[in-house]
Amino acid sequence: MPIIFDPVFCVLNGREFSIEQYANNTLNVSDDAIRVKSHANNLEDRVQSLLENFSHHIHGFDIQAPVCVLLPRVSCKSVLKRISSVILSLFNLEANPLIRFYPYGEASLLMALSQLEELSHQNTVPWIIAINLAQGSSSKFDVYDSLVVARCVAVKEGLNVRTQSIDLELTPLNTATDNIVRQLGNASEQSFDELLLSIGIEEEPQWLNSIHFLSSWISAETRYIFSDSRTGPLGACGGLLKALSLCHRQRVKHVENFQVLQVDIETQGYAIGTIFNWCSE
Protein backbone atom coordinates (compact mmCIF):
# COMPACT_ATOMS: atom_id res chain seq x y z
CA MET A 1 0.00 0.00 0.00
CA PRO A 2 1.46 3.42 -0.93
CA ILE A 3 2.21 6.05 1.70
CA ILE A 4 2.32 9.83 1.75
CA PHE A 5 4.04 12.25 4.11
CA ASP A 6 1.80 15.12 5.25
CA PRO A 7 3.33 18.22 6.87
CA VAL A 8 1.79 19.56 10.08
CA PHE A 9 4.27 22.14 11.40
CA CYS A 10 7.65 23.34 10.12
CA VAL A 11 9.94 25.82 11.88
CA LEU A 12 13.44 27.00 10.98
CA ASN A 13 15.42 29.61 12.89
CA GLY A 14 12.40 30.56 14.98
CA ARG A 15 10.02 31.09 12.07
CA GLU A 16 7.28 28.91 10.66
CA PHE A 17 7.43 28.03 6.97
CA SER A 18 5.38 26.01 4.50
CA ILE A 19 6.44 22.90 2.65
CA GLU A 20 5.60 24.77 -0.57
CA GLN A 21 8.38 27.27 0.20
CA TYR A 22 10.82 24.47 0.87
CA ALA A 23 9.83 22.39 -2.17
CA ASN A 24 9.97 25.40 -4.49
CA ASN A 25 13.36 26.47 -3.12
CA THR A 26 12.04 29.89 -2.12
CA LEU A 27 12.72 29.56 1.61
CA ASN A 28 15.41 31.89 2.92
CA VAL A 29 16.87 32.33 6.36
CA SER A 30 17.07 36.11 6.39
CA ASP A 31 19.74 38.00 8.29
CA ASP A 32 17.13 39.68 10.47
CA ALA A 33 15.50 36.40 11.49
CA ILE A 34 15.12 35.72 15.16
CA ARG A 35 17.67 33.07 15.96
CA VAL A 36 16.32 30.70 18.56
CA LYS A 37 19.43 29.25 20.13
CA SER A 38 19.90 27.82 23.56
CA HIS A 39 22.97 28.68 25.62
CA ALA A 40 22.77 25.31 27.38
CA ASN A 41 25.67 22.95 26.81
CA ASN A 42 23.94 19.60 27.12
CA LEU A 43 21.69 18.20 24.44
CA GLU A 44 18.66 17.51 26.61
CA ASP A 45 18.47 21.14 27.81
CA ARG A 46 18.84 22.40 24.25
CA VAL A 47 16.04 20.12 23.06
CA GLN A 48 13.86 21.30 25.94
CA SER A 49 14.58 24.96 25.12
CA LEU A 50 13.67 24.46 21.45
CA LEU A 51 10.41 22.66 22.20
CA GLU A 52 9.36 25.10 24.92
CA ASN A 53 9.65 27.95 22.40
CA PHE A 54 6.85 26.31 20.40
CA SER A 55 4.88 24.70 23.22
CA HIS A 56 1.71 26.61 22.31
CA HIS A 57 1.75 24.90 18.90
CA ILE A 58 2.81 21.51 20.22
CA HIS A 59 -0.03 21.27 22.73
CA GLY A 60 -2.57 21.98 19.99
CA PHE A 61 -1.53 19.06 17.79
CA ASP A 62 -2.99 16.32 20.01
CA ILE A 63 -0.09 14.02 19.12
CA GLN A 64 -0.69 10.43 20.16
CA ALA A 65 1.22 7.19 19.73
CA PRO A 66 2.49 5.79 17.47
CA VAL A 67 5.26 8.36 17.15
CA CYS A 68 8.68 8.21 15.51
CA VAL A 69 11.08 10.84 16.85
CA LEU A 70 14.00 11.80 14.59
CA LEU A 71 16.99 13.23 16.46
CA PRO A 72 20.53 14.51 15.95
CA ARG A 73 23.16 11.78 16.11
CA VAL A 74 23.43 10.61 19.72
CA SER A 75 25.76 7.73 20.59
CA CYS A 76 25.56 7.89 24.39
CA LYS A 77 22.67 5.84 25.78
CA SER A 78 22.35 7.90 28.97
CA VAL A 79 22.11 11.14 26.96
CA LEU A 80 19.51 9.58 24.67
CA LYS A 81 17.51 8.45 27.69
CA ARG A 82 17.48 11.98 29.14
CA ILE A 83 16.49 13.50 25.78
CA SER A 84 13.71 10.93 25.44
CA SER A 85 12.36 11.83 28.88
CA VAL A 86 12.30 15.54 27.98
CA ILE A 87 10.40 14.89 24.74
CA LEU A 88 7.90 12.51 26.31
CA SER A 89 7.17 15.06 29.02
CA LEU A 90 6.79 18.08 26.73
CA PHE A 91 4.56 16.22 24.28
CA ASN A 92 2.51 14.66 27.09
CA LEU A 93 3.27 11.18 25.81
CA GLU A 94 3.58 8.04 27.88
CA ALA A 95 6.61 5.85 27.27
CA ASN A 96 5.44 2.77 25.38
CA PRO A 97 6.64 0.55 22.52
CA LEU A 98 4.81 2.70 19.97
CA ILE A 99 7.07 5.69 20.64
CA ARG A 100 10.44 5.14 19.01
CA PHE A 101 13.55 7.28 18.82
CA TYR A 102 15.92 7.43 15.87
CA PRO A 103 19.12 9.30 16.90
CA TYR A 104 20.87 9.12 13.53
CA GLY A 105 20.97 12.74 12.38
CA GLU A 106 20.25 13.23 8.69
CA ALA A 107 19.80 9.47 8.23
CA SER A 108 16.97 9.29 10.81
CA LEU A 109 13.92 9.45 8.50
CA LEU A 110 15.08 6.70 6.17
CA MET A 111 16.19 4.62 9.17
CA ALA A 112 12.61 4.89 10.47
CA LEU A 113 11.00 4.25 7.10
CA SER A 114 10.24 0.54 7.44
CA GLN A 115 8.61 1.15 10.83
CA LEU A 116 6.54 4.01 9.43
CA GLU A 117 5.41 1.82 6.54
CA GLU A 118 4.44 -1.01 8.87
CA LEU A 119 2.48 1.26 11.19
CA SER A 120 0.64 3.05 8.39
CA HIS A 121 -0.38 -0.29 6.87
CA GLN A 122 -1.98 -1.25 10.20
CA ASN A 123 -4.67 1.42 9.77
CA THR A 124 -2.85 3.82 12.08
CA VAL A 125 -1.44 7.24 11.25
CA PRO A 126 2.02 7.49 12.81
CA TRP A 127 3.30 10.92 13.77
CA ILE A 128 6.84 12.04 12.99
CA ILE A 129 8.71 14.60 15.10
CA ALA A 130 12.08 15.74 13.74
CA ILE A 131 14.46 17.92 15.74
CA ASN A 132 17.70 19.61 14.70
CA LEU A 133 19.90 21.74 16.93
CA ALA A 134 21.92 24.84 16.06
CA GLN A 135 25.66 24.54 16.04
CA GLY A 136 28.66 26.47 14.85
CA SER A 137 30.07 25.59 11.46
CA SER A 138 33.16 26.42 9.42
CA SER A 139 31.08 26.32 6.25
CA LYS A 140 29.29 29.23 4.62
CA PHE A 141 26.08 28.06 6.32
CA ASP A 142 25.07 28.15 9.94
CA VAL A 143 23.17 25.17 11.23
CA TYR A 144 19.92 26.34 12.75
CA ASP A 145 17.44 25.02 15.25
CA SER A 146 14.59 23.41 13.38
CA LEU A 147 11.49 21.41 14.21
CA VAL A 148 9.29 19.51 11.77
CA VAL A 149 6.10 17.65 12.68
CA ALA A 150 4.43 15.43 10.08
CA ARG A 151 2.30 12.32 9.61
CA CYS A 152 2.74 9.21 7.49
CA VAL A 153 -0.53 8.10 5.90
CA ALA A 154 -1.44 5.02 3.86
CA VAL A 155 -3.15 6.13 0.65
CA LYS A 156 -4.44 4.73 -2.62
CA GLU A 157 -1.87 6.67 -4.64
CA GLY A 158 1.49 7.69 -3.25
CA LEU A 159 5.06 6.64 -2.56
CA ASN A 160 6.21 3.06 -2.83
CA VAL A 161 9.55 2.06 -1.31
CA ARG A 162 11.16 0.05 -4.07
CA THR A 163 14.51 -0.70 -2.42
CA GLN A 164 16.81 0.62 0.27
CA SER A 165 20.51 0.35 1.11
CA ILE A 166 22.29 1.24 4.35
CA ASP A 167 25.87 1.20 5.62
CA LEU A 168 27.75 2.60 8.60
CA GLU A 169 30.65 4.95 7.86
CA LEU A 170 33.55 3.84 10.04
CA THR A 171 36.36 5.56 8.10
CA PRO A 172 36.91 9.00 6.54
CA LEU A 173 37.06 7.38 3.09
CA ASN A 174 33.29 7.51 2.40
CA THR A 175 33.23 3.78 1.67
CA ALA A 176 29.71 3.51 3.12
CA THR A 177 28.44 6.10 0.66
CA ASP A 178 30.16 4.28 -2.21
CA ASN A 179 28.57 1.02 -1.10
CA ILE A 180 25.00 2.23 -0.89
CA VAL A 181 25.09 4.24 -4.12
CA ARG A 182 26.63 1.29 -5.97
CA GLN A 183 23.99 -1.10 -4.62
CA LEU A 184 21.14 1.23 -5.51
CA GLY A 185 22.55 1.77 -8.98
CA ASN A 186 22.66 -1.99 -9.47
CA ALA A 187 19.08 -2.34 -8.19
CA SER A 188 17.57 0.33 -10.43
CA GLU A 189 15.71 -0.63 -13.60
CA GLN A 190 14.87 2.81 -15.00
CA SER A 191 16.18 6.36 -15.11
CA PHE A 192 15.73 8.62 -12.11
CA ASP A 193 13.41 11.59 -12.39
CA GLU A 194 14.97 13.20 -9.32
CA LEU A 195 18.01 12.76 -7.10
CA LEU A 196 17.33 14.14 -3.60
CA LEU A 197 20.69 15.13 -2.14
CA SER A 198 22.27 17.37 0.50
CA ILE A 199 25.22 19.69 0.04
CA GLY A 200 26.23 19.45 3.70
CA ILE A 201 28.98 21.46 5.38
CA GLU A 202 32.07 19.83 3.90
CA GLU A 203 34.01 21.34 1.01
CA GLU A 204 32.70 18.54 -1.20
CA PRO A 205 29.44 16.65 -0.64
CA GLN A 206 30.10 13.09 0.52
CA TRP A 207 28.14 11.61 -2.39
CA LEU A 208 30.06 13.53 -5.07
CA ASN A 209 32.62 10.82 -5.81
CA SER A 210 29.98 8.08 -5.68
CA ILE A 211 27.46 9.49 -8.12
CA HIS A 212 29.15 7.79 -11.09
CA PHE A 213 27.65 4.49 -9.91
CA LEU A 214 24.29 5.88 -11.07
CA SER A 215 25.48 6.97 -14.51
CA SER A 216 23.37 4.37 -16.33
CA TRP A 217 20.22 5.81 -14.75
CA ILE A 218 20.90 9.55 -14.99
CA SER A 219 19.52 11.26 -18.07
CA ALA A 220 19.30 14.81 -19.36
CA GLU A 221 15.85 15.00 -17.72
CA THR A 222 17.06 13.93 -14.26
CA ARG A 223 16.66 16.76 -11.74
CA TYR A 224 19.18 17.24 -8.95
CA ILE A 225 17.34 18.56 -5.87
CA PHE A 226 19.75 20.02 -3.31
CA SER A 227 17.55 20.26 -0.25
CA ASP A 228 19.82 22.46 1.86
CA SER A 229 21.04 24.92 -0.77
CA ARG A 230 19.20 27.85 0.85
CA THR A 231 18.84 26.72 4.44
CA GLY A 232 22.10 25.01 5.26
CA PRO A 233 22.17 21.51 6.77
CA LEU A 234 19.07 20.58 8.75
CA GLY A 235 20.14 17.25 10.22
CA ALA A 236 17.25 14.98 11.20
CA CYS A 237 14.79 17.53 9.78
CA GLY A 238 16.54 17.45 6.41
CA GLY A 239 15.66 13.87 5.52
CA LEU A 240 12.01 14.40 6.45
CA LEU A 241 11.80 17.66 4.50
CA LYS A 242 13.15 15.90 1.40
CA ALA A 243 10.32 13.36 1.59
CA LEU A 244 7.69 16.01 2.31
CA SER A 245 8.79 18.16 -0.62
CA LEU A 246 8.86 15.12 -2.90
CA CYS A 247 5.23 14.37 -2.05
CA HIS A 248 4.28 18.01 -2.58
CA ARG A 249 5.90 18.22 -6.02
CA GLN A 250 4.30 15.00 -7.15
CA ARG A 251 0.86 16.16 -5.99
CA VAL A 252 1.24 19.44 -7.87
CA LYS A 253 2.71 17.99 -11.06
CA HIS A 254 1.98 14.31 -11.41
CA VAL A 255 4.79 12.50 -13.25
CA GLU A 256 4.03 9.11 -14.77
CA ASN A 257 6.42 6.18 -14.22
CA PHE A 258 8.09 8.22 -11.51
CA GLN A 259 11.34 7.12 -9.82
CA VAL A 260 13.39 9.07 -7.28
CA LEU A 261 16.49 8.35 -5.23
CA GLN A 262 16.87 9.96 -1.81
CA VAL A 263 20.32 9.78 -0.22
CA ASP A 264 20.86 10.85 3.41
CA ILE A 265 24.34 10.79 4.91
CA GLU A 266 25.24 11.53 8.51
CA THR A 267 28.93 12.35 8.92
CA GLN A 268 30.61 9.61 10.99
CA GLY A 269 27.28 7.83 11.08
CA TYR A 270 24.93 6.01 8.73
CA ALA A 271 24.70 6.49 4.99
CA ILE A 272 21.35 5.39 3.63
CA GLY A 273 19.56 5.62 0.32
CA THR A 274 16.05 4.75 -0.82
CA ILE A 275 14.52 4.41 -4.27
CA PHE A 276 10.90 5.61 -4.34
CA ASN A 277 8.31 5.00 -7.03
CA TRP A 278 4.90 6.68 -7.27
CA CYS A 279 2.16 4.10 -7.65
CA SER A 280 -1.52 3.32 -7.19
CA GLU A 281 -2.91 0.60 -4.96
Image: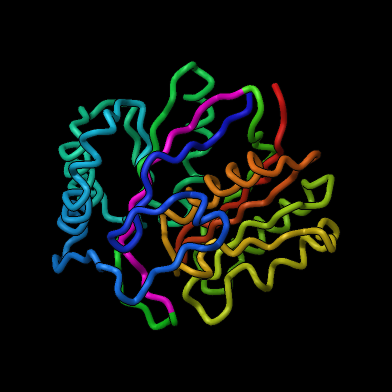
Instruction: Kindly report the secondary structure that dominates the magenta region of the rendered protein.
Output: strand
**Residue lying at 45% horizontally and 69% vertically, measured from the top left:** 232
- Above or below, 68 against 38 in this view is above
- Which percent across, then down, holds residue 237? 42, 53
Q: Nearer the viewer, residue 3 or 100?
A: 3
**Residue lying at 60% horizontally and 47% vertically, measured from the top left:** 246
Magenta stretch encompasses residue 12:
no
- Which percent across, then down, holds residue 168? 52, 57
Q: Nearer the viewer, residue 38 or 103?
A: 38
In the rendered image, which quarter is residue 7 located in?
top left
Give the side of residue 51 with respect to residue 126, left or right. left
- Above or below, 250 against 114 in this view is below
Magenta stretch, residue numbers: 141-155
- Which percent across, then down, holds residue 8? 39, 39
- Above or below, 38 against 241 in this view is below
Give the side of residue 218 with respect to residue 161, left or right. right
